[in-house]
Image: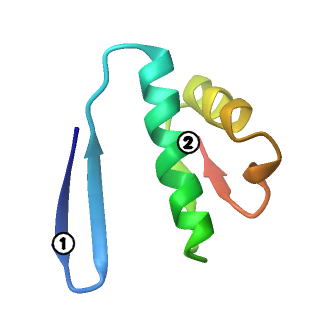
Amino acid sequence: MSTVTTHGEFAHPALFYRTEQEYTRQTVAFLREGLANGEPMAVAVPGPNLGLIKAGLGGDAEGILFLD
């Protein structure tokens, strides 16, 4: 489940999850959708979560800016 707050063209979704697997699955799906739509992508999460996301994306991680 996510909630999206919009202001102009900016949208900030919130992600609710219970497990690392659920977090990874939902985050990767969101990022892949953005990539498919040609949207610029940046991910800013704590380091351990970056590893989960990068592993989940595999080769699709190219072109995404990752920030710890």
| Residue found farthest to the bottom | 8
What amino acid is found at the position of numbered circle 2 in the picture?
Val
Q: Which image quadrant for residue 35?
A: bottom right
Compared to residue 26, the image places residue 10 above or below, namely below
- Badge 1 density bin: few <14, some 14–19, many ≥20, Cα 10 Å: few
Residue occupied by mark 2: 28
Compared to residue 48, the image places residue 12 above or below, namely below
Q: Which image quadrant for residue 1?
A: top left
**Relative to residue 27, is residue 11 drawn left or right?**
left
Residue 45, x across and y down, in percent = 49, 39
Residue at 54% from the left image edge and 53% from the top image edge: 31
What amino acid is found at the position of numbered circle 1 in the picture?
Thr
**What SS does tag 2 mark?**
helix
Residue at 44% from the left image edge and 27% from the top image edge: 23
Q: Nearer the viewer, residue 41 or 37?
A: 37
Residue at 70% from the left image edge and 41% from the top image edge: 57
- Colour scheme in the image? rainbow
Circle on res. 43: none
Residue 48, x across and y down, in percent = 60, 23
Residue at 50% from the left image edge and 18% from the top image edge: 21
Residue occupied by mark 1: 6
